[in-house]
Image: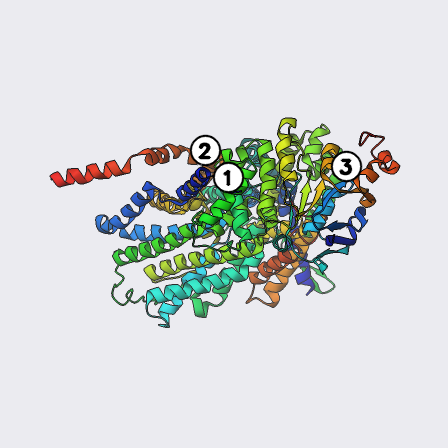
Amino acid sequence: MPVVLETIALVKQFHGIVASDNVSLQIEKGARHALIGPNGAGKTTLINLLTGVSRPTSGSILLDGEDITDLSTYKRVRLGIVRTFQINQLFSDLTPLETIGLAVSERRGQGLDWWRIVGSRPDLVAEVVEILERFHLTDVIDQRTAVLPYGKQRLLEIAVAIACRPRVLLLDEPAAGVPEDERHEILAAVAALPSDVSVLLIEHDMDIVFSFADRISVLVNGALFVEGTPEEVAHDVRVKAVYLGEELVDA
Amino acid sequence: MTPSPVAVRTATEWLAARARWHPLEFVFWIAAFAAIYLLPDRHLILTEIAWLGLFALSLDLILGYAGIISLGHAAFFGFGAYTAALLAKHEIINEPVLALLVSACAAMALGFLTSFLVLRGSDLTRLMVTLGVALVLRELANRYGWLTGGADGLQGVSVKPVLGMFRFDMFGHTGYTYCLTVLFILFLIARRLVNSPFGLSLLSVKGNPLRSSAIGISVDARLIAIYTVAAGYAGIAGALLAQTTAFASLEVFSFDRSADLLLVLIIGGAGYLYGGLIGAIIFKFMQDYLSALTPQYWPFWIGLVLVVIVLVGRDRITSWTAPIRHFAARLNWRALARRIVASTERL
Amino acid sequence: MLTILVDGIAYGMLLFVLACGLAVTLGLMNFVNLAHGSFAMAGGYITVVLVNRFGVPFFASLPIAFLASAAIGFVFERTLYVHVYRKSHLDQVLFTIGLIFMSVAAVDYVMGSSQVFVGVPDYLQGKFDVFGIGIGRYRLLIIVICGLLTLALQLILTSTRFGSRLRAAVDDSRVARGLGINVNWIFALTFAFGSGLAGLGGALGAEILGLDPTFPLKFMIYFLIVVAVGGTSSITGPFLASLLLGISDVASKYYVPTLGAFVIYTIMIVVLIWRPQGLFSRTASR
């Protein structure tokens, strides 16, 4: 499978702390690629670098072979690199309808339309509602995001990313902080992602990782430690040592 | 997967209701226009309320909708005022509406040039930079007294009749009608703008700029756009002041003007477009009343009002008007109108 | 030219004493206190009243101005400011603008709107002759007093327990609280101290800067420039910024009088664009 997004010797240094250490990562088209590692390994930093929220100290990032290292975040989104945030970043005063509506209208290039009333395009509304239904958000369609239960907010976080019709989707711990009984909705949404979308998933929950991923990269102290299929990684002695002897998978 | 028709209908209806004209809005504008005929002896103060309301509306666009705190919005107001006054004085453009458009363009140009200053930095940086721009303009106006009239102000300005037909009089009759019409047109445009996808993107930028850029919005471009538009609106307000008073002086750039403007908007409430207009009404009548009581020291009471508003809490104050709005929304307006029409027919 | 340099240094150090309270308040409590100049004005007027009307010796009136302004600051902090800490920056701006308006009008009412002068003792008037250059005695006094104050401040901050607690609270007030440091008390004391310094600066500066009820408004922008350019994470930042501002203001008024304050504002805007967190600060502003 061709490589869609890759980093070449990516380094990020903050005042003497090396957050990303010579990371060369390839994400293939249609990948279900998981990124795991202990806390503080630099996983979110890597996502920030991939999306343009941070600029690398050195190294480059290529999308379909094109160098995008100097592109700003919003331009990368328009090229199809979309992410979710580990801690919900939503618009607390907007409703899910408005939030998804905004994402869809921006994607359609109607963001600068200052004359048309929001909601007057039936096809746009239909697409928005379809996304909301897919993520089980229609019952809270008109409530302010700030008052939504955490699980719904998390679903909205993923729904917003999907509404941007990503080519590469970077999910930063989508199930983090979600209570046990609401997790299945998140997992179902993640599993139902279109097969041509390339997904990089950061997760700590190993059940999710191993049921989802066909390729796993392990990040430790900012550097790529081990890479391979789930079976290879699960049985790798060094990985087990890094996770302090945790049993990753039933043998 | 096709969406369920019920959900689509709910969504469409909710979005339409979001932008629909509230009955109280009709009441407001009908009253404003009726005042042309019903309150002729108050036209002077109403003219001031009209351009002050427009000025506050322009601040609402950047503060209430885009979250930019500005202590120097008077920069654009003053720029528009001097442009209009100079156009009239030197008879470069003799028709006021045309001069108004030119002043708007001038103010928008200034807004565009200075918009880059408010993109970066914290709230404090923005405060300082906007304040600095206004002060710089004031200094420039002071230095170039041969053009601006310096500290004495620009004398000898005579404004020709609006559209060649409506002469400005000293009772403010033409002035009020002129200012109100301009305000109404600009208000309609602003109303469309804030209810558009662009307006929604502004709210998102205000609420969470990180998230906005993460869905593909160029935060800088949107802020530059609204800052420019708001500068244009402020410039028109300044031009209206200059045209209705046939005068312009340094204090159009003063910090006092920017500070008073913040108060006007805060009294009415930011973020729903009417706050500036309502605030202008309350502020002007308050100023009128207090100046009559204590001509020299009324800023003390204005300051006290500001302090009290902040201590009580702006949210709590807007929640006091909530019952009125709920009541108005629940009234059966059609039935009421029918009854009024029926009772007048009986007369 | 040396005279201008001395004038500029005096002006700059005076600005520092006036503005450092604002820098610490902003850095410590993330609170934009635009009304800082009002405390300076208070100190100035107190000195004027004491010296002119009650014949108190000039040097005796300075500590009184400091203490009185500090006391006023303490009272205001505990009764009013404390309610506004958690509010948005917009609310803080509105609140302090309101205080400025009230203080300006109140002083106007009580003291009249014309400029007032302090009866500076004779031996402080006139110039010293140093290598054929005249250096104003009063300005020399200001440099000495403000220099000593700056050193004292630096000592307090670096060598005392209070200083280290203050620095901890500025760095991260939540962690400081967690360490058992009484952050509220530090806020109150620091605010009082900063207001006291402002009052002292107002007393010293009345002669050079001109004191009238519009003082807080006229000088607000200068204090803000010092804080914005110098940053809020150290003493040296605002100190250097004040000197820079003082010297360039005096120099530009002398060499290019037609442009005057325009130069200062433009420098400020340029600096803020180039480095939004200030020229001298270590970290980005919050």
Colour scheme of the rendered structure: rainbow
Q: Secondary structure at mark 3?
A: loop
Mark 1, residues whose alpha carbon is within 10 Å: few (<14), some, or many (≥20)? Answer: many
Marking on residue A95: 1
* Front residue of this view, candidates C212 and B106: B106
Q: Nearer the viewer, residue B4 or A40?
A: B4
Task: Give the residue furthest to the right.
Answer: A237
Chain to which the residue tagged by mark 1 belongs: A
* The image quarter in which residue C251 lies: bottom right
Q: Is residue A138 above or below residue A58?
A: above
Query: Foreground mark, 1 or 2?
Result: 1
Residue A39 badge: 3
Q: Are tags 3 and 1 found on a single chain?
A: yes
Label 1 sits on a secondary structure element that is loop
Compared to residue B317, the image places residue C111 above or below, namely below
Residue C113 in view of the camera: no
Residue at point 47%, 64% (across, down): B141
Question: What chain is tagged by disc 3?
Answer: A
Q: Taking B200 as reference, is C71 left or right?
A: right
The residue nearer to you, when weighing C227 against C252, is C227
User: Which residue is labeled 2 in the image?
Assistant: B316
Answer with left or right where residue B303 lies relative to residue C191: left
> Quarter holding the N terminus of chain B?
top right
Q: Amino acid at mark 3?
A: Asn
